[in-house]
Amino acid sequence: MTPILQQFLSEARDFLQSISEKLLQLEKAPDDAALMADLFRSVHTLKGNSGLFDFPEMSRVLHAAEDLMSAVRDGRLTFSQQLADRLLDAMDFVALLLDEIPAGTDASAHAPASVSLAASLRELIVDAQQVDDEQVHPGEAATSRGSAAAVMLPLDAVPEALRAAWREAARAVPLHWIVYTPERDCFFKGEDPFHQARQTPAIVWQRVKSMEVWPPLAELDPYQCVLRFDLVSGAARAALDEHFRYVPEQVSIVPLTLQVLESGLVTASAAEGAVHAAANNAATPDAAAAHDSGNGTFALTSFAEAILAAQVTALSLPDDVAWLPGRVRAIASTLAACFRSSGRIDALPSLAAALATALSLNRAAPLRDWVTAHDALQVLPLEATTQSKTANTSAPAPDAAPQPVNADIPGGRRPDDAGAVLKVDQTKIDRLMSLIGEMVVAKNGLPFLAARAESVYGVRDLAREIKTQYAVINRIAEEMQDGIMQIRMMPISGVFQRFPRLVRDISRKLGKEVLLTLEGEQTEADKNIIEALAEPLIHIVRNSLDHGIETPQVRRDAGKAAEGHVVIRASQDSGRVLIDISDDGKGIDPAVIKRKAYEKGIIDEAELERISDQEAVNLVFAAGFSTAETVSDLSGRGVGMDVVRNAVERVNGSVSLTSETGKGTRICLSLPLSMAVTNVMVIESNKQIFGVPMDMVLETVRIPRGAIRSIKNRQTTVLRNRILPLRSLNEMLAENSPQVSNELDEIATLVVQIHGESLGIVVDDFREVVDIILKPMGGILNAVPGYSGSALLGDGSVLMVLNPKELVSWQ
């Protein structure tokens, strides 16, 4: 995949997200003209970008979407929910095509779907136009839809002799009349309509006409295309469709049958409805810049006169310039083109002679005299031209300040805009993160080297210098780590952006009215954390809409507003990302949860009587638990909140849930800012060292053996007036050795938090706290429970990092 294609895919996905957001905003503010214009520009740009590649299905749908939004923007169509639905479906289709591009999938299989989508979009425009026609001219509208409607091809522009030859050729070779009308702003999409027309296969006749009267030369906008190309081709229809496959909406192709060549009339059905625009344009010859007279001579308009007058003006400039030969040659070339287009080929030899004389004398006068002498093109004498044609030429004053080129170019980029954002491949950032991780490991080896220099070799001064350099390297490494982490940090809006569409679609499917509020979208977290958030949040929002928010009538009966409210809020606190998802629905009834859990065998009869309401609510995190009575595509499969908890815990996060019957539910996710570098506490047990993630450690204490009690064969102690369960690490790791104590008969206890509850893990001793790069377990070791992964310490030893949550649940 080429770099430009990769850039297109990245930008296209950003455009699609932006388009979906603006469509949802327009549903709430359909009269916002600025928002509609911004949406139109986004689709317009995306369509133009797709035109750079061979994606005809994508371009077809995007062009139809652009036409539809253009109709809304111009006031010809009213924005509606049906219109939004079809546009969103079109964007989903484009997203599907974008996902298949990297795999090299043949998109031609989607051609029927793209044609259907484009037709459904344009159907709204046609329906609206028919309604307008019926309101303004009801009788005419009915007549225009009659099957007998016919249009006239401008065959009178073709000499009779040539038409006779076509009639003979049409008996053996299929001829087609092609009308190609490029868009006014086609140049900004990388299109070259002149080249497109000239490359049409098997051309037997062609002409170029202007769609409007040419303005004075000084007022001519060179960035707008106002041309129309009429062509006759002997190629097959399939070849013509293939040639114009990127601009099918700008082309009408009509078979030139013998009947058509005789009468010039084409029925609407024969033209497949596409020739109407060509006929309308052909019916207004006065609007053209040039037209063919009956004898084939060429009559100039004011624009052609202005071109020739400009040449005369240029020829009257002083001759004492070094570039005079180039100027004269350019003027002669322009004059030759004008005469050749008019059919006055007989004048070209004298023009060539005048040019040779001007070059030999190094003067422009011979060429100027030639122009003045040839009045067949209605060129006025020099004196009259310079006086009466001033309004047409409107040449700028010599001292006028030139305007910036990009000031008038739509979408022009100012120089100071360049380089504002630098997009970097994700793999490069990951490589930098891996390198900084290795630097952290190497940095941690310096203290070991200093200790060895002092204890083994007795070189205390060298040990001191190593420690000094360690402090410097440590500061640099921390700053580099922080800098790279900032590059990896992304706003959480990347996840939040998908929820307006999700809430809209699900609420409509369920027949509910829901208002979604997003807060803290600019809260940043590590890219991997944000990616891990997507699925859990989707589960939570779907559950909130399906189980939490009531239908409008039920809410009214309960004294609530008919519209439910879901709030998703993100914030940072103490180096962690907090995400709250709350709703004002019916909440979770603990009695229902208890009954369902008992029926599914999750709790027994004794627990059913003993369990508290909050503990009952937390049962929704149990595997296979669901309160849905029936299975649907939204719920009832027993896969939901347990998936949420597992996904959050995999990134060292935690989830809590609170609910109040009749008032709503709130779920809070707490996640680390980053997973790249992990801060762990090194502990010792049975002469081995292990690591425990610091974000799970509440505190470390030493408990006297006399303070330990047994409750139902479980060791416990009282810590700060609260009962603290104790578990031996050796026992959890299936080690037979008892935990050792210090000289004061105190046992080292690591107090951790698991599922909101405190637990004391008894170890032999505490070591230091270090930063590590956690590597996942590979191969068959990946299936061993109780371990998060491994890390390399500064002295070269391997540290196994424990997962206390798995260790406890495994027992």
Image (cartoon, rainbow, N blue to C red):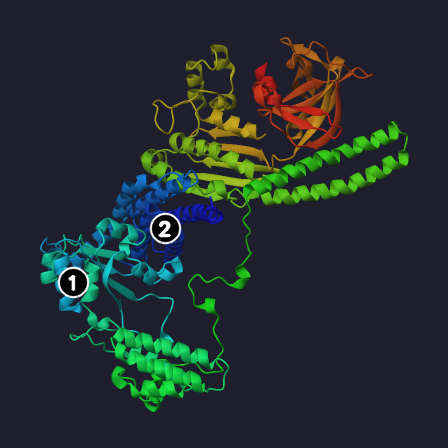
**Which of the numbered marks, if any, corresponds to residue 26?**
2
Q: Is residue 690 above or below residue 421?
A: above
Q: Secondary structure at mark 2?
A: helix
Q: Residues within 10 Å of mark 1 (few under 14, many from 20)?
A: many
Residue 749 in the image, given as x and y percentages of width and height: 71, 20
- Which mark lies nearer to you, 2 or 1? 1
Determine the residue positioned at 51% across, 17% down. 611
Q: Residue furthest bottom?
A: 383
**First reached walking from the N terminus: tag 2 or tag 1:** 2
Label pair 2/1, CB-CB below 8 angstroms: no
Residue 404 in the image, given as x and y percentages of width and height: 48, 70
In the rendered structure, which amino acid carries the disc numbered 1? Leu
Residue 736 in the image, given as x and y percentages of width and height: 69, 9
The picture quadrant where one finds residue 367 is bottom left
Residue position marked by numbered label 1 in the rendering: 153
Q: Is residue 364 above or below residue 535?
A: below
Is residue 429 or residue 505 the one in the foreground? 429
* Mark 2 and mark 1: Cα distance apart in space: 42 Å
Determine the residue positioned at 46% across, 66% down. 406
